[in-house]
């Protein structure tokens, strides 16, 4: 007879113990943007809510950005680096197929032999990483997980493309997730629609791009993305509340992926969130930072005092793939 395997018991739930972020120092205003594309400050603000964004400089590679964001998250969490036994980095702008960013990050932070890997889920990357961290902890596969969402979208943006250049930006956000007897991360609602893979996509793969001597860039057909986000994704956000067993009145904070203020406005109408709910609007000064937008917004709301520890926040990410994921979390 086969001997029974010993398995590890996991925790009842998990919670976010701390968040942190890193913003590149260079600010690109709409005025500067309009020296690159035929547009206007008024048009960009009206259509997206963006006033300015950050683009990383040469001395701010992704490795530096994720290390800085992680250091802040670890400090805020009070968790010792010795306890972190898994690292997940979500990014679509790490331009080397291998090695992944996560093991390099773990080494930079001096972590002891953690599991470490990257995931590619575009603007939903942070919420995917959180779902994984929660599942790893509840399965007993990890005790404390460092999750990071980070992008240098400026590397893949055609600065002369008036349909994308004003939108995409750079930044990094991180969180430490630990086991908890009182769950602080609700059930994930997630999914994908690969039939719409073409609506946000890299123009060529790197093998095809090399002979041309041109970096591939990001192509986006904005209208179908807008439609999808304001209908299907708005419904998914409703489903998150339902699956978590919360009424909109019980929510304190809403942190949607910072894709476009008009998408956020439309979701708010759809969700019928009460007036007291604090809504993240970091897109105004930071643009769309893809996987980094949710953790950066969470960090900024907490550090500005607009949101406080113990409040419930609905977070949702959505983007290229198309993919989406979201959950309700208790803020650290
Ligand atoms: C990108 C987006 C802002 C464009 O807005 P839109 O209303 O769809 O814009 P359109 O392409 O229909 O263009 C509308 C008008 O603005 C003009 N226009 C387009 N880009 C412009 C720009 N950068 N500056 C000024 N005018 C512009 C067009 O020429 C058109 O003019 P016309 O009416 O005289 O023909 C919008 O589609 C959007 O936000 N989509 C979602 C994108 C997103 O969130 N992506 C990230 C998901 S993770």
Image (spheres, rainbow, N blue to C red):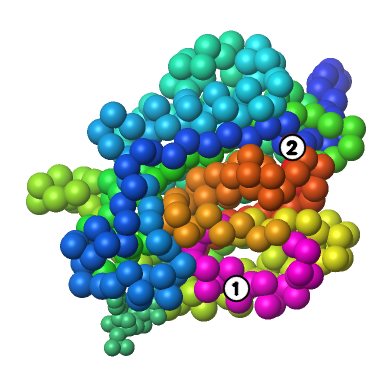
Which mark identifies residue 265? Answer: 1
Quarter-of-image position of residue 43: bottom left
Residue ID at (47%, 36%):
22
Confirm whether residue 40 shows in the render: yes
- Residue at the location (44% across, 39% down)? 23
Question: What is the number of the mark on residue 332?
Answer: 2
Residue 330: image location, x then y, percent: 78, 44
Q: Tell me if residue 328 comes above or below residue 145 in the rendering.
A: below
Which of the 4 image quadrants contains residue 142? top right
Image check: 13 left or right of 45? Answer: right
Q: Residues within 10 Å of mark 1 (few under 14, many from 20)?
A: few
Is the residue marked 1 within 8 Å of ligand 1, measured from its CB?
no
Circles 1 and 2 in contact, beta carbons < 8 Å:
no
Span highlighted in magenta in the image: 257-277
The residue nearer to you, when weighing 123 against 286, is 286
- In what element is the residue under mark 2? loop
Residue at image coords 46%, 31%: 66
Q: Residues within 10 Å of mark 2 (few under 14, many from 20)?
A: many
Q: Position of residue 184 (x, y in %)?
A: 81, 41
In-front residue for pair 99/307 = 307
């Amino acid at each position: 007879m086969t001997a029974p395997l010993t398995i590890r018991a996991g925790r009842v739930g998990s919670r976010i113990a701390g968040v942190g972020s890193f913003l590149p120092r260079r600010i690109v205003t709409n005025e500067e943007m309009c020296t690159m594309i035929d547009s206007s400050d008024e048009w960009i603000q009206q259509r997206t809510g963006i006033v300015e964004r950050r683009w990383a400089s040469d001395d701010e590679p992704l490795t530096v950005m994720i290390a800085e964001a992680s250091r802040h998250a670890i400090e805020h969490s009070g968790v010792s680096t010795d306890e972190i036994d898994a690292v997940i980095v979500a990014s679509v702008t790490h331009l080397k197929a291998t090695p992944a960013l996560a093991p390099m990050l773990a080494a930079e932070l001096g972590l002891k032999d953690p599991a470490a890997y990257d995931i590619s889920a575009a603007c939903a990357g942070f919420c995917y990483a959180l779902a994984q961290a929660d599942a790893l902890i509840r399965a007993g596969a990890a005790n404390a997980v460092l999750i990071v969402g980070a992008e240098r979208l400026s590397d893949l943006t055609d600065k002369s493309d008036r349909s994308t250049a004003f939108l995409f930006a750079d930044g990094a956000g991180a969180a430490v997730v630990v086991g908890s007897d009182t769950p602080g991360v609700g059930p994930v609602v997630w999914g994908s629609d690969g039939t719409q893979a073409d609506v946000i996509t890299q123009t060529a793969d790197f093998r095809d791009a090399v002979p041309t001597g041109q970096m591939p860039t990001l192509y986006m057909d904005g209208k179908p993305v807008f439609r999808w986000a304001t209908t299907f994704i708005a419904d998914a956000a409703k489903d998150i509340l339902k699956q978590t067993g919360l009424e909109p009145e019980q929510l304190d904070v809403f942190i949607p992926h910072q894709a476009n203020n008009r998408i956020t406005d439309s979701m708010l109408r759809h969700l019928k969130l009460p007036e007291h709910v604090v809504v993240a609007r970091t897109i105004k000064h930071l643009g769309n930072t893809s996987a980094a937008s949710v953790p950066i917004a969470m960090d900024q709301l907490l550090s500005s005092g607009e949101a406080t520890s113990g409040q419930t926040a609905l977070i949702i990410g959505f983007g290229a793939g198309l993919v989406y994921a979201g959950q309700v979390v208790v803020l650290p």
